[in-house]
Amino acid sequence: MDRRSLLKATGIAAATTTVGVTSSAGIASGEVEVTQESDYEVWTVTGKEVYDLSDGEELSNVLVDQSADGACLTIRSRNSRNWEVRNVGFVGVGQAGSGSNRFQFQVSAPEGSQGVIENVWANGKERDGQPSTELGGIYIRAAHGGQMKIRNTYIEGYGNNGAYASAMGKDSGNGGTVTIENAYHRDNTVSQFRIGSTDSDVRNCVGIVNDPNGERGVYTGTTDNRNARGIWGLHYPDQRVENSSFYVSPDDVNPDGVFEARYIPGRSGGSRAVLEVVDCDVNPDAPSLRESTSNAEVNFTNLGNEPTADVIGGGGVPLSPEMAARGEREMPDPPEFSESNGGDGTPDLDRTLTIDGTNADRTDYEFTVSGEIAENPDVGSLGEGDQIDGATATGFVNGGVDGYLFSGEITDATVDGNATILVDGEEVDFGTPDLDRTLTFDGTNADRTDYQFTVSGEIAENPDVGSLGEGDQIDGSTATGFVNGGIDGYLFSGEITDATVDGNATVLLDGEEVDPETLGLNRTLTVDGTDAERTDYEFTVSGGLAENPDVGSLGEGDQIDGSTATGFVNGGIDGYLFSGEVTDASVTGDAPILVDGEPLDLGQFESAPTIDRYEVVEVDSPNPDANIVVEWDVSDPDGDLASATVEVVNDSGTVVDSAETSISGDVAYGVDYFAIEDVDGQRFSVQLTVTDSSGNESSASESVQE
């Protein structure tokens, strides 16, 4: 039995034993009652505790009882090598704390090594008199540079992602990879699966969001945010989810997109964020199938609409904490369909698509829908060259007519030929997107006004307004021009992502007059100080920035300088409109910061702590013992230092002694002393790791010899 970080006793038999644990403060301040069942140990925790994995450790067959008021056990690896955690179940709802107790797992493995988490059951929903948790499920630390394998896990109801595996893809991360397979994650706030590095993937998994009563945990630091996605891919291209099923119910308390990609300028480590979705299924009535920010995209290959738990391999997942501790698992129930879909899992094929080649040359086609698809018997049988594969139809017409019934939306289409295409009886042109929005610059009663704007979709001249002038041009998704007594009009799709207007012409968006200063600023940021103490803030965006007139005027202490806003709230609310992404933010105070109505994760903008001084000395003495004195000074410009850990590691890579100090504020100083007996002539690596409350860390190492 290897319990080097948690258990300080050996030879535990069937009797009950009380042993010390290393708490998040780095001292044996808590107690764990350990009892031996026939198939597993039971660890009963009563406070906020941490179990640190060691190099090569295999932790298995443990039932963690954290049902006591405020109890939580976090299993942690701070870059230990080649460790494995198997067959662990959590009884009770662990409650979040500061520092290390913010996730149920908080792990990493260095480059050239791996970590394994397998056959785990954990549930953060409110039950048995316990409130739901703000804890996250499995968090992969930014320091992760190796390989992480997460398999056959059941994670439900956590407040900060089921699997949070994107931090290593930030510009300060170490870029390790993660593979999540044969997992069943449901009703976790933010996302069921979150990845963020090249070659990371999710496969043979099920992700469900169907919590109409809001029993899952709220996002950290909020009171009611339970926004939940299926899967989120961040920071890098070449991320993949395959052979997996997702069900996001329209009846959920706060559903978001099934598949989302996000790129954060200045913070993401890659060039763009791309999530490849291959051979997956999703319920056809999901509220939002695909969402992405600028410089990010979600691509579909063979997307179906029959989500099933049968994609899970390896015998399924544990369905109770006791099953997990015994090393057992079985197949979970299939994803449940919502009442809004009839309750039988079969959507109505109430839409039609017709390819009419009666008066056309041969026309080849392929299209994919977000729901289901079938032959339309009212049109007639499909020909030999026509076929349906999942949610995709492929074929051709050469003088005839092909017809289909489908549900959902057409998500992808290619047409090669001049046949007439009808959707729900209306002719459409798949080669030209539906430009259903208008932008007009009316210079009739104005001075010369120059303009330029960019849209997220496509753009064209508006024939209802008239022809553009010589100085007006469209280049891709950007239009540039001017009006000087006349009117310019455009049709476009998507959103206006950037715009500049120099002059006093009237600007009309979709027929409504808008302030040119806010044109293209389609996102909101709100600092709500209604129930908070004074809060000072500063934030920067990648695009334009303006005051939000719907919130009210900014105060005297608030100002906008280019793309940066600075100010404070003291019982009131400040609101801004912006475009692009929030690239930097700092906040002093407790007022919530909301972007598009959702809490802003301030941790992503924080810098890692700085090690200002680190001195390691072996006190020379005429004995075979190593007497090591470590002195350190650290700082953090964000002012949220959390812990400083010193580890003494021998030549074989074993940690022979360590000390963890709880720290706070923006500067800290400490001295640690280690006495290691009978190590004549041996050399040691003394490693310092400093962490802030957002999980950012810095490390230094010095070598000494006895």
Image (cartoon, rainbow, N blue to C red):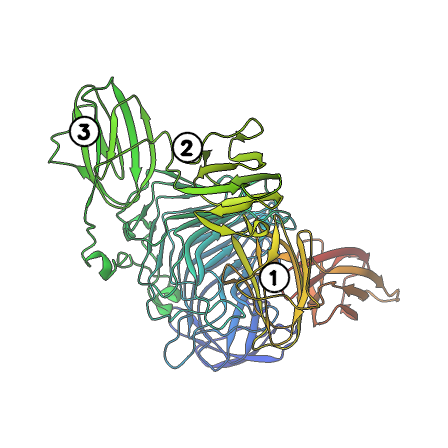
Query: Is residue 143 something one can see in this rendering?
Result: no
Q: Quadrant of residue 326?
A: bottom left
Q: Is 134 or 586 nearer to us in this picture?
A: 586
Q: Is 686 or 645 nearer to us in this picture?
A: 645
Residue ID for mark 3: 402
Label 1: few (<14), some (14–19) or many (≥20) C-alpha neighbours in 10 Å = few
For residue 356, side relative to residue 495 (left or right): left
Residue ID for mark 2: 463
Q: Amino acid at mark 1?
A: Leu
Checking the image for residue 602, the label placed there is 1
Q: Say if 372 sits above or below 121 in the image.
A: above
Q: Amino acid at mark 3?
A: Asp
Q: Secondary structure at mark 2?
A: loop
Query: Is residue 267 something one can see in this rendering?
Result: yes
Q: CA distance from mark 3 to mark 2?
A: 33 Å
Q: CA distance from mark 1 to mark 2?
A: 46 Å
